[in-house]
Image (spheres, helix red, strand yellow):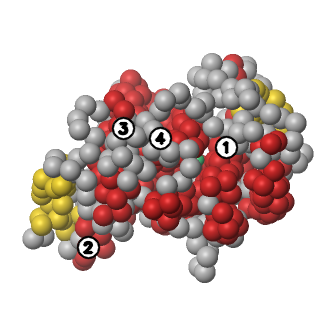
C-alpha cells in the first residue's frame, strides 16, 4: 500500500487501505448519507450549488498534498488521510515510555481514549454550524472561498475522528459517530460539548477572531494528541495540523487586513485619536477599541477550552501515554513528570498568584501557556501593522483571569489587565471590555456582501497575495 498517495476510487478517498477493510468500509459507507444530510442542513447556508475554488487533499506528502479546483461543496471529496507510519515509533512519555507505539487501543485506556477522540470530533462540525450564515455577508469572493475552505476541512476533520471511532471502538464507537451528527451548536437540548463551540459567530470580525483564537486551541490539542502513544491518533492529528495552519492564516490575515483598513482610513481623514469612536465609525471602518473587545471575548472563550487549572484527567491522559505536551518530542526532561513541578497562575485567598504545582496535574495550564505564547506572536504582527501607519494604539491579550467560565477564575470578576473587581464594578464596566449591543449593531451594519470579483467591502483591505497565486480579480466562487 502506498501510504503517500490516496485511493480515490471508492466512495471515501483514503490512504488507510479501506478497500481491503470490509467491516470499516461498510460502517463508514453507512455513516456517509447521514453526514451529507448534516452538511446540507447545517453547512454553508445558500451556497451548496455554487462552484468554489477549493483545495482537496490528494496526498500526505508535505511537498504537494493538495490540488485546487472548482467544486460544489456537497461534492467535496472528504477523505481519511493519516500521516505516514514512522518505522519503530515509540511511546515517548508517561508510564509506557520506550514501549513500541500502540497500533491497537490498549484495553485499559479504551474509555479515556474514546473520550479524547469524541471531544476532538465534536468541535469539528460545531464550527461549521457556527459559521453557516457567514457566506451571505462575505466581504469578497476571496474571503468567501476561505470560509468555505475552512468549513470543508472541518468536515474532513470530523471524518478523521469518525474513522478512528469506527475502526477501533466497536459498537460504542459507532454510537459516538452517530451522536456527532446529532448534537448542534447552541442547541438548548443537545448542544455541542464545549462552551466556545456553542457561541454565535455573528459577523466576519468574529469569524477571523474565531479562526485566530479557537482554531489555535484546536492546533494545540492536535499537537498534544499528535504525540500520542496510540499511533493512529498521532498520525491522523499530524495530517490535520497541515490543514489547520491555513485556518489560522485566515484568522491572522483577516484581522491584519481589518486593522490596516481602519488605520489607513483614519490617516486619510486626519483622525489621530483611535478612541474617537464616533468619528472613526463615520468612515465605515471598525474602530480599534471594538476590535480589542472582540479580541478579549474570543481569547477568553478559547482559554476556557483548556479546562481546569488542576486536572486529574490531564494527568491520567499523560501518564497513560495518550496525550502529550506541546512538542513533547523536542522537550528535554524525563518525560514522566512524576517529581517535577510547574508554575500555575491561581486564585488564592482572593488574590491572583503564581504557585508551583505538581507538573502532571497542571498539564492543561502548560498547554494553555504554550497557546498564549503562540497567540502573542500574531498580536505583535497586528501591532506592527498599526505602528506602520503611525496610529498610536496597541492591541493586547487579556489576562487569564478575565471573563472566564471555567476554572478558578470563573468565581471572580477581573478586568483585561487582571485587576479583580466587584460584580457591581464589572456590570458598570463590562461594555468597556466586551462588545456591547451597540458595537454589535454597528458591525452588523457593515456586513454587506461584496460579490464582484476583485472587490472588497470598505472595512477590510485586500490580501497581499491570492490563494494558489491567483490574480486579484480571480473569481474564487462562481455563485449559483
Ligand atoms: Fe479542525
Ligand atoms: Fe480548524
Q: Earlier in the sequence, mark 1 or mark 4?
A: 4
Q: Which quarter of the image is occupied by the N terminus?
A: top right
How far is mark 1 from mark 3, CA to CA?
A: 34 Å
Say above or below: 256 vs 352. above
The residue labelled by disc 2 is: 411
The reply to whether discs 3 and 4 touch (Cβ–Cβ < 8 Å) is: no
The dot on residue 403 is: none
The dot on residue 153 is: 1
Nearer the viewer's eye, disc 1 or disc 4?
A: 4
The residue labelled by disc 4 is: 101
Is 286 positioned to the left or the right of 129 in the image? left
Tell how many labels. 4
How far is mark 2 from mark 1, CA to CA?
A: 37 Å
Q: Earlier in the sequence, mark 2 or mark 1?
A: 1
- Name the one closer to the observer, 49 or 27: 27
The residue labelled by disc 3 is: 98
Q: Earlier in the sequence, mark 3 or mark 2?
A: 3
Amino acid at each position: 500500500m502506498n501510504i503517500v498517495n490516496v485511493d480515490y476510487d471508492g466512495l471515501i478517498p483514503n490512504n488507510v487501505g479501506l478497500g481491503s477493510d470490509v467491516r470499516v468500509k461498510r460502517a463508514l459507507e453507512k455513516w456517509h448519507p447521514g453526514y451529507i444530510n448534516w452538511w446540507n442542513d447545517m453547512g454553508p447556508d445558500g451556497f451548496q450549488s455554487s462552484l468554489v475554488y477549493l483545495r482537496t487533499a490528494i496526498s500526505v506528502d508535505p511537498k504537494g498534498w493538495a490540488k485546487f479546483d472548482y467544486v460544489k461543496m456537497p461534492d467535496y471529496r472528504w477523505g481519511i488521510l493519516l500521516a505516514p507510519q514512522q518505522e519503530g515509533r515509540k511511546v515517548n512519555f508517561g508510564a509506557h515510555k520506550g514501549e513500541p507505539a500502540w497500533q491497537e487501543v490498549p484495553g485499559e485506556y479504551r474509555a479515556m481514549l474514546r473520550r479524547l477522540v469524541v471531544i476532538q470530533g465534536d468541535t469539528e462540525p460545531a464550527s461549521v454550524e457556527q459559521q453557516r450564515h457567514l457566506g451571505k455577508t462575505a466581504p469578497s469572493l476571496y474571503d468567501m472561498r476561505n470560509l468555505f475552505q475552512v468549513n470543508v476541512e472541518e468536515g474532513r476533520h470530523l471524518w478523521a475522528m469518525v474513522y478512528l471511532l469506527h475502526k477501533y471502538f466497536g459498537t460504542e464507537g459507532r454510537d459516538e459517530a452517530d451522536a456527532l451528527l446529532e448534537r448542534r451548536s447552541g442547541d438548548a437540548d443537545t448542544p455541542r460539548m464545549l462552551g466556545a463551540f456553542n457561541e454565535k459567530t455573528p459577523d466576519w470580525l468574529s469569524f477571523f477572531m474565531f479562526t485566530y483564537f479557537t482554531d489555535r486551541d484546536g492546533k494545540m490539542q492536535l499537537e498534544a494528541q499528535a504525540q500520542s502513544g496510540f499511533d493512529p491518533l498521532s498520525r491522523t492529528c499530524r495530517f490535520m495540523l497541515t490543514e489547520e495552519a491555513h485556518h489560522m492564516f485566515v484568522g491572522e490575515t483577516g484581522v491584519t487586513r481589518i486593522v490596516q483598513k481602519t488605520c489607513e482610513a483614519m490617516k486619510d481623514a486626519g483622525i489621530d485619536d483611535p478612541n474617537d469612536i464616533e468619528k472613526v465609525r463615520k468612515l465605515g471602518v471598525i474602530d480599534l477599541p471594538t476590535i480589542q473587545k472582540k479580541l478579549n471575548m474570543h481569547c477568553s472563550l478559547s482559554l476556557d477550552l483548556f479546562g481546569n487549572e488542576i486536572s486529574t484527567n490531564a494527568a491520567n491522559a499523560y501518564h497513560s501515554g495518550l496525550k502529550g505536551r506541546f512538542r513533547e518530542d523536542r522537550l528535554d526532561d524525563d518525560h514522566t513528570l512524576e517529581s517535577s513541578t510547574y508554575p500555575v497562575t491561581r486564585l488564592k485567598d482572593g488574590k491572583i498568584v503564581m504557585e508551583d504545582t505538581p507538573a502532571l496535574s497542571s498539564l492543561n495550564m502548560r498547554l494553555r501557556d504554550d497557546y498564549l505564547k503562540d497567540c502573542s506572536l500574531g498580536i505583535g504582527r497586528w501591532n506592527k501593522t498599526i505602528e506602520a501607519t503611525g496610529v498610536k494604539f496597541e492591541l493586547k491579550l487579556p489576562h487569564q483571569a478575565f471573563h472566564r467560565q471555567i476554572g478558578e477564575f470563573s468565581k471572580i470578576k477581573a478586568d483585561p489587565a487582571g485587576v479583580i473587581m466587584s460584580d457591581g464594578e464589572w456590570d458598570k464596566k463590562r461594555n468597556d471590555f466586551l462588545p456591547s449591543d451597540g458595537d454589535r449593531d454597528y458591525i452588523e451594519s457593515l456586513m454587506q456582501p461584496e460579490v464582484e470579483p476583485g472587490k472588497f467591502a470598505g472595512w477590510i483591505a485586500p490580501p497581499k497575495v491570492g490563494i494558489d497565486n491567483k490574480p486579484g480579480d480571480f473569481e474564487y466562487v462562481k455563485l449559483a
